[in-house]
Image (spheres, grey):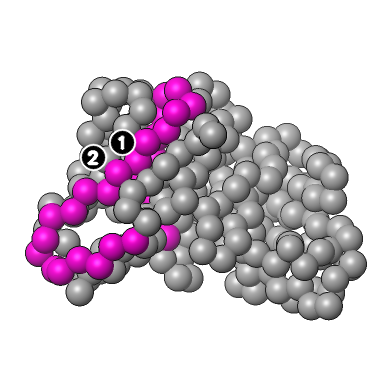
Amino acid sequence: GQNIDQPTEMTATEGAIVQINCTYQTSGFNGLFWYQQHAGEAPTFLSYNVLDGLEEKGRFSSFLSRSKGYSYLLLKELQMKDSASYLCALMDSNYQLIWGAGTKLIIKP
Amino acid sequence: IAGITQAPTSQILAAGRRMTLRCTQDMRHNAMYWYRQDLGLGLRLIHYSNTAGTTGKGEVPDGYSVSRANTDDFPLTLASAVPSQTSVYFCASSQGDSSTDTQYFGPGTRLTVL
């Protein structure tokens, strides 16, 4: 079967750095996605990893280790607008997305 | 502006009633999806369509049906609504042609079944 775990909630300070972890178990793997979802809005795409290593996009970076079944999303220079839920999703062997429950990130001034 | 639209934005429905949630995209994407999102749970796939004329069942298809008569539209029908179908429903679409397939989401429909 497949399983995705990520923390339910995290709190960080404006201007700081935060790392949101995602661990998974799957029999088939075709990549891992991170999405951002503000309250009451639709999820929006942030990043995609299929090979081990770090992908950097401005203030956001995403890391993948396939052997460890582990990914993280790193957010730097946090801004109040980064307060949102961050969803980890893996693409399975059928090219369908399996979603984690999401991590609610609260940014404090 | 290109994208995905959903209608209605929200709806309160009596149990036992039939309801169709509409989804339209203008990006000429091949694949479309319906998800439900419930508090504390991840997005769960209800039905999907890899291309016009084909549909498939997702993780939680019971009580729902879909059709894909053309590329742009992918309506979701609840034949006889039950309170457990109270949820936020998201439609999404993607090119559907590679493993790096990014899904783009509509704004969602908040459905309450009483």
- Residue at 74%, 63% (x, y): give it: A81
> Is B26 part of what is drawn in magenta?
yes
Tag 1 near tag 2, CB within 8 Å: yes
> In percent of the image, x 45 and y 55: which residue is there?
B43
Q: Earlier in the sequence, mark 1 or mark 2?
A: 2
Q: Quadrant of residue A6?
A: bottom right
Q: Secondary structure at mark 2?
A: strand
The extreme front residue here reads B1
Look at label 1 and name its amino acid.
Phe
Any part of residue A9 in sight: yes
Q: Residue at x 41, y 66 (%)?
A: B38
Alpha carbon distance from label 1 to label 2:
7 Å
For mark 2, does the 10 Å Cα neighbourhood hold few (<14), some (14 to 19), or many (20 or more) residues? many
Q: Which residue is mark 2?
A: B66
Q: Quadrant location of the N terminus of chain B?
A: top right
User: Which residue, given by chain and number where applicable, does mark 1 sit on?
Assistant: B74
Q: Up-down: is B69 above or below A26? A: above
Left or right, A5 with reference to B33? right
Q: Amino acid at mark 2?
A: Val
Q: Are marks 1 and 2 on the same chain?
A: yes
Residue B74 placement: quadrant: top left
Q: Residue A41: where, in percent of width, then height?
A: 53, 58
Q: Main secondary structure of the magenta part?
A: strand
Q: Which residues are magenta?
A: B10-37
